[in-house]
Amino acid sequence: MRSTTFRASPPRQPTALSLAVVTTLLAGGLLAGCGGEPGDAPDLPTGDGLTSEDGTAVLAYHQFSTSPSLAWGQGSSDPLDPDYGALSFFVAGVPERTGTLDGDRRVVLELADGPATAAQVAAGEVAAAHVSGGSLNPAWGFLVNSIPFGPDFGDMAAFLYDGGGLELVNDAFRGQGMDVVALPVVGSPEQIAGYFSKPLGIPDCPEGDEACLAHGDGIGIAGLCAEPWTLRYLPPAETILDQACDRVGGERRMDFVQAIPGGSAFLTAVQQGTIDGFEFATPIDDWDAARGGFFANPSAPQGSDGRNLGEIGLRYVHHPGWHQPFFMGWMVVSRSRVWDALDPEQQDAVRAAGREALVSSHQATDSVQCHYFRQIMEATPGTLQRGPDGETREESAELVLTRWTEDDLALLKSVAVEVMEAGRGGASPSPDQADYGRILDALLAHLGHDSVQEMTDHWFGADGSSPLAACLGR
């Protein structure tokens, strides 16, 4: 396995359980049975698949994002490098692992233009695509991407590799006739739970900040639902917030915009007021505007007016990350055009590279979680908000750490349990819903929980802790 040294500000220490799980994953053997019994390797195909160049098999792949903790396979493995990319661990690991095999059996990954979906891989339109785990399947994808109020990264990774989860994912694809093999290859930690112009929970107001103090303990879920805001949240968190509004009743004016990816379109939409509140990703992704973030505006993409979130007015930064306790990205490859063209030892080497990359990318991003979160929270002290014309307003732009209230978290958790149970499809589930039920039941059994409710009761924030708040000593 590669040895990579990470230069970082004091990393957040993992829990004993998570550390033990990660250590076990790194030390564990290769995953077997990720897609049927491999036979004799056929000749390498040509075209958009595996091509042979001087004895090296070259695989063209697509990626859905250039954000640092989510993808960017051409980047650096150093999380403090401005060019850091979490997918780079897998892109470097595949040729390293396959390069140790006897003969000319090295496999290299090359980036193809534009994003692609798992469905496009299954249809034979592209050979491979790195995708968000949530987009693997509309019914069950989020179960292997990140579960609201769900397990932490270490527990999910252990389920996939030691609890049969990865086999279930690929069995679901095979059962529906999808010609793909999927491997988890990118991991990242807890995400920021949202930026809003008013605190939904209890703000940690700076001394003398009268505008902040006037909000008291925040507007809460009921207040959020009554605001004429357009939010960017991703399902299933969007579904949970939407149904929470139905639960509290009262005036309802809040709505959602269709998911906008990172980059200038997202930043300028916020600056132009098309989006009034949102969640995006981890602090490293939220930081640099040139990489899809919202703060380091000297490097902002074309189209930005130069204002960061505090200057725009979205100054209340929410925690804990109930909506996405971690993230997993997956590499989906064509079974017939790619996977079956590899011999068994090559397949094992690619699996090993994926396993190592999943854990190493999570560790790398987690090691700088506090470093970048502090930069975000210290981006606008003593400054004022600005309009799109640059004119200042007599309103503070200082960012304020805000915790969702216990009552609202309890409401959201209750709705999340209902949403997850409803995903089973009742007495007559669709094929996707049946797969959802199988994966969810296996996960609960692996975690030792008897119900979804019990799983959410063991969520990391259930005891009032918040890793992001701990970065600031709060």
Image (cartoon, rainbow, N blue to C red):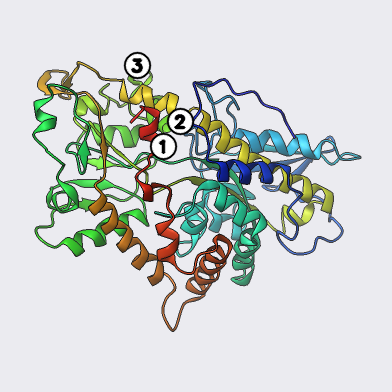
Q: CA distance from mark 2 to mark 3?
A: 22 Å
Q: CA distance from mark 1 to mark 3?
A: 29 Å
Q: Name the residue type under label 1.
A: Pro
Q: Look at 50% across and 43% down and name the residue there.
A: 64
Quadrant of the image occupied by residue 24? top right
Q: Look at 42% across and 76% down and name the residue there.
A: 425
Q: Is residue 356 left or right of residue 125?
A: right
Between 393 and 109, the one nearer to me in the picture? 393
Tell which circle, 1 or 3, labels the residue nearer the N-terminal end: 3
Q: Is residue 62 left or right of residue 285?
A: right
Give the class, few, some or many, for how many residues have Cα within 10 Å of label 2's Cα (few <14, many ≥20).
Answer: many
Give the class, few, some or many, for how many residues have Cα within 10 Å of label 1's Cα (few <14, many ≥20).
Answer: many
Quadrant of the image occupied by residue 236? bottom left
Query: Label 1, on which residue?
Result: 467
Residue 369: numbered disc = 2
Tell which circle, 2 or 3, labels the residue nearer the N-terminal end: 3
